[in-house]
Amino acid sequence: MRTPFLRPMAALLKDILARLDAAYPFAWAVPEDRVGLQVGHPENPVEVILAALEVSEPVVAEAQAKKAQLLLTHHPLLYQPLGEVREDRGAGRLLAAVLRAGLALVACHTNLDVAPAGVNDYLARLLKLEEVELLSPVSGDPLHKLAVFVPVGYEDRVREALFDDRVGVIGRYSHCSFAGRGQGTYLPLQGAQPFRGEVASLTRAEESRLEVLVPESRVLAALDRLKASHPYEEVAYDLYPLKNSGSPLGFGRLGRLSPPLDFTRVVAWVKEVFGVSGVRVWGPAPARVERVAVLGGSGGDFISTAREKGAQLYITGEVRHHQVNLGDLKDFAILEVGHFSSEAVFIPEWVRQLNLLFQENGLKVQVHGAQTEAPPFACL
């Protein structure tokens, strides 16, 4: 995103939440998920963020060492309701550690899984899949039309502030807008500081009506950028909900390896990509692999979807025994790389995205990736 008219400013936790909600909307999470602010006060200042897969005692200690005010995780700490907060047990012990460290805690879970450029998009890129599509679509991001009235000569300034990777995008075309000329009138009242004209005097201004498409998840951020870049003291705009389908969202990705590879080479490639020494293989190995499905984390519920969509190989973090019907695995295999390993590879990319997100939105925040995380078990 480009927001050249915003000057860097100190960030509050609520500012961080607003930018996260624009990039990975919390409304995209599945209904039973627990995302967003879990610990902390929205008005607290934030200068340093530690991004991690999940909360652990080493991660909390690392956040303290880096003088972070916010711990941003993929897995929510508070997922199941707590009946008690005991410091000698599991979640209670970790929650107490977060509170004692003075950390805020925010989670981006399934909203990050389904997001464009989120976990699963990145896994498809790592695996160098081509012709990538959603494995299991769940919904879309509804579109709105933003119409704003801009003095002639300022159209490009406002356009450039509004456009980002999803605002003003139609299919494979970005920077899409429409402008039509007309005449606006206004009479500044006492106390106004008009861009043109005088207080108590009717002004006629040559203006353009500028229109762009904005996904619902980007509306608030787009309006912030509009007001920061517009020359008028009071910005006149209209926002219309549309029936056009927005960007599709969904779990997992499905794509093609080019050229196709034999199974043993694919296994070696997967182990290299995810940094693991071994994988669990379910089903008979296909001789050649071209169509590949991938889903980070727990992917057992999507096995049938991957097979029915023509995948020869399904790569995921973990599956449970009862989710696999070996009789259905003809010319189809599952590679289980481990829940942790299937998602931890995204953390460095997430840190890169977050630093760019906050920088381009004028927030003076540094994001670091946790270095103390490790798989919860070892294979001997």
Image: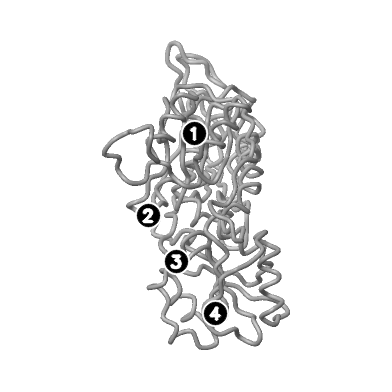
Q: Earlier in the sequence, mark 2 or mark 1?
A: 2
Which amino acid is tagged 4? Ala
The residue lying toward the viewer, choosing from 50 and 340, is 340
Which amino acid is tagged 2? Val
Q: Identify the image's colour scheme: rainbow, by chain, secondary structure or one colour.
A: one colour
Q: Disc 2 vs disc 3: which is toward the camera? A: 2
Q: Disc 2 vs disc 4: which is toward the camera? A: 4
Q: Which residue does the image show at 44% across and 48% down from the upper left?
A: 216
Q: Is residue 10 above or below residue 274?
A: above
Do callouts 2 and 3 mark residues in contact (Cβ within 8 Å)? no
The residue lying toward the viewer, choosing from 327 and 200, is 327
Which amino acid is tagged 1? Gly
Q: Quadrant of residue 66?
A: top right
Q: Disc 3 vs disc 1: which is toward the camera? A: 3
Q: Disc 4 vs disc 3: which is toward the camera? A: 4
Q: Quadrant of residue 326?
A: bottom left
Q: Is residue 30 above or below residue 357?
A: below
Is residue 214 shown left or right of residue 124? left
Residue position for label 1: 184
Identify the image quadrant of the N terminus: top right
Q: Which mark is residue 137?
A: 3
Q: Which residue does the image show at 50% across and 46% down from the upper left?
A: 74
Do callouts 2 and 4 mark residues in contact (Cβ within 8 Å)? no
Residue position for label 4: 333
Q: Is residue 322 above or below residue 48?
A: below
Q: Earlier in the sequence, mark 3 or mark 1?
A: 3
Q: Tag 2: Cα neighbours inside 10 Å, few (<14), some, or many (≥20)?
A: some
Q: Which residue does the image show at 67% across and 66% down from the upper left?
A: 271
Label 1: state its secondary structure.
strand
